[in-house]
Image (cartoon, rainbow, N blue to C red):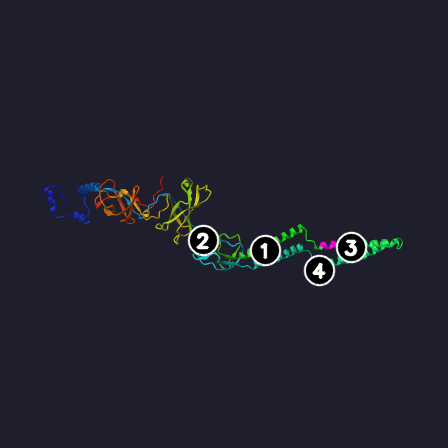
Amino acid sequence: MLHNQGHPGELAAMSAPTPEPVVARLRSFQVAESERRGGGRIRRRYWLWLAVLAVLAASGWTVRSHLMTSSVPEVDTYTFTGKATREVVLDLSGFIVPHTKVAISPQVGGSISKVLLPEEGKTVKTGDLLFTIEDTRYRTELEQAEAALTTAQAQKKELEHGREKEEIDYAEAVLNQAKVQQGLARADYERARKLSPGSISRAEQDRILTAYRDAEAAVNVQKRNLDRIKAKACAEKREAADAEVRRARAVRDRAKYFLEQTRIVAPDDSEGKACVFTVLQKNVNPGESIQAGLNNSPACTLADLTQMEAEIDVQEHDLGVLKIGTPCEIIPDAYPDRVYRGYVNRKQPIINRQRGAVQVKITIANPDDYLLPDMNTRVLLLKNAPSASADDELPEIPRRALVPGIDAPTVFLFDGQVARLRQIDLGATVGDRVQVRKGLLPGDKIVLPGDQPLLDGQPVRLRGEIKGDHLERRNP
């Protein structure tokens, strides 16, 4: 709509036929400067009124929301987990480790001739053959060592028992011959001595006496020779012979050990008892060459997964509350709903300087197939061991969550926007907490109204949430 405040003459002029320049301007949608000036003021007033109305509407909505919100009570909630409460001394992180873990590396080098080791995850028992190494060289060395031992034992026996029987018999025969000659010489000497003086010449007497003495000397010589042949070796030679036998036996045992090491079998456990191992790693294949002592990784790694432990680091300032036998609960990160019981078994007798902590091993009493080596876990050291009583295993809630003035135990549950009454069955009262037998489900948010009264179905606003963990935090 156009508003024209001109004179009547001007109106008449406007009713007249439109001049050509005006028609051209209308066709090109062009407006004169004076016309644009008047229309702009109107549009500015229009938008100004719209802005004022928008501000007033927003303010009203804010005030209305504030009034509505201020009338809804704020409450805290307690998340019910359905698990029994424990008093925790320490809450630490650690790893699952097997009690017995064996990394097998061959003690001898050579080519792998046979592999009987199963794939990872399979089991083997003590004494099972895992793989073999080519043993030709080690078998030859054993035969050489056994031959050297036999030679040393024979030499020792010769020293202990003297010469051969033929030599002894010959020496005895020579001695007997010398005794015969001695007897003949003694007879000649006795006859010559009994003869009257002058019966024989002086030279003959000297010859008979010399022959008699030669015969005696020959007997003495043959006796000494026989004694020497029969005599045992002296102590020094016997000791030397014993040492040579021991040396040869040691060489034989060493060669035998190396030959036995070409057959790699599953070992015993840490206590020398037979057990079943699970193959964790397998790094050996037929035809591979192994050099003893130069392998960066073991040929295979075995572990007894029936005996598992949790390994944690305890800081120095917490050692005062750490005791051997302290009950524990182990909660793997992979399975937070599975809780395993255990106890503190042992600790290292030295503290790590860099971390200021001591390593502690927790024995897991009830391991199963869910637990794997090097798995991350949460370890909770408890003040008291879990009781076998059924009531002691009931979950608990804060006693202030109970709604007063109602005969049956009742609590408010937060149902998204409103508080709903729920009747529950209680057990014993433990300090400022009460045990719940039934009526609640894990994940229920229990309203903690405090001093303000609530009605069933009343809208409430969530102010804070208290995590109802089945284990309390460490007491300061």
Dot 4 or dot 2, earlier in sequence: 4
Query: Considering the numbered disc 4 on the image, is that residue within a helix, a strand or a loop?
Result: helix
Residue flagged by tag 4: what amino acid is it? Glu
Query: Considering the numbered disc 2 on the image, is that residue within a helix, a strand or a loop?
Result: strand
In screen coordinates, is 293 left or right of 240? left
> Mark 4, mark 1: which one is toward the viewer?
4
Give me the C-alpha separation between circle 3 and circle 2.
81 Å
Question: Magenta residues?
Answer: 216-228
Residue flagged by tag 2: what amino acid is it? Ala
Residue flagged by tag 3: what amino acid is it? Ala
- On residue 91, the disc is none
Query: Considering the numbered disc 1 on the image, is that residue within a helix, a strand or a loop?
Result: helix
Query: Considering the numbered disc 3 on the image, is that residue within a helix, a strand or a loop?
Result: helix
Dot 4 or dot 1, earlier in sequence: 4
> Mark 4, mark 2: which one is toward the viewer?
4
Q: Residues within 10 Å of mark 2 (few under 14, many from 20)?
A: many
- On residue 166, the disc is 4
- On residue 218, the disc is 3
Q: Which is nearer the eye, 351 or 244?
A: 244
Q: Which residue is mark 2?
A: 303
Dot 3 or dot 1, earlier in sequence: 3
Residue flagged by tag 1: what amino acid is it? Arg
Question: Which quadrant does the C terminus fall into?
Answer: top left
Q: How many marks?
A: 4
